[in-house]
Image (tube, helix red, strand yellow):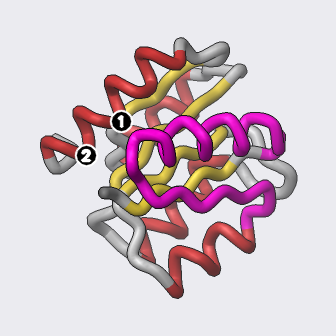
């Protein structure tokens, strides 16, 4: 059982991913506000963060950068409806495990998350 943090500015996306991964037996904590997600990571151990790139106040890569300062070992999946070379490069510099373009195939996301969690992220 992994501790998964989900951050997306769309509540529907957070609810969907929370239900999906709780159904797989994981503890999932969903957020639509960047500050709340970062505060949660400061107070709790997080195994995996699933983060949208376009958020309300920050970019997903900026949130990931903050999370990596808190817990360098945290693994992450970034989701974006607006893929750019710059965001992909920054994500991989920060050690993101996966960078997926929306609309994300749920089966593919499940498969990638399970692979990340079972392999230690490598």
- Element under label 1? helix
Dot 1 alpha-carbon crowd within 10 angstroms: few under 14, some 14 to 19, many 20 or more: many
The residue lying toward the viewer, choosing from 89 and 82, is 82
Verify whether residue 25 appears in magenta: yes
Whether residue 111 is visible here, answered yes or no, is: yes
Q: Which residue bears the numbered disc 2?
A: 117
Vertically, is 30 above or below 17? below
Vertically, is 66 above or below 107? below
- Where does the magenta region start and end? 9-34
Rendered residue at 70%/21% (across/down): 82
Q: Which residue bears the numbered disc 1?
A: 113
Rendered residue at 25%/46% (across/down): 117
Whether residue 90 is visible here, answered yes or no, is: no
- Element under label 2? helix
x and y percent of residue 94 in the render? 39, 51
> Residue 121's quadrant in the figure?
top left
Q: Is residue 89 left or right of residue 122?
A: right
Verify whether residue 71 appears in magenta: no
Q: Is residue 34 left or right of residue 57?
A: left
Label pair 1/2, CB-CB below 8 angstroms:
yes
**Which quadrant of the figure contains the N terminus?**
bottom left
Q: Is residue 59 left or right of residue 77?
A: right
Vertically, is 94 above or below 81? below
x and y percent of residue 11 in the render? 82, 44
**Which quadrant of the figure contains the C terminus?**
top left
Q: Which disc is residue 95 wearing?
A: none
x and y percent of residue 119 in the render? 13, 42
């Amino acid at each position: 059982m992994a501790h998964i943090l989900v951050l997306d500015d769309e509540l529907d996306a957070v609810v969907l991913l929370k239900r999906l991964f709780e159904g797989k037996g994981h503890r999932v904590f969903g957020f639509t506000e960047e500050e709340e997600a970062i505060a949660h990571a400061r107070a709790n151990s997080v195994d995996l963060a699933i983060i949208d790139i376009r958020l309300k106040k920050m970019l997903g890569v900026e949130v990931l950068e903050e999370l990596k300062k808190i817990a360098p070992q945290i693994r992450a999946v970034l989701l974006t409806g607006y893929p750019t070379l710059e965001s992909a490069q920054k994500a991989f510099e920060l050690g993101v495990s996966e960078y997926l373009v929306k609309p994300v195939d749920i089966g593919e996301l499940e498969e990638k998350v399970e692979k990340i969690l079972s392999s230690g992220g490598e």
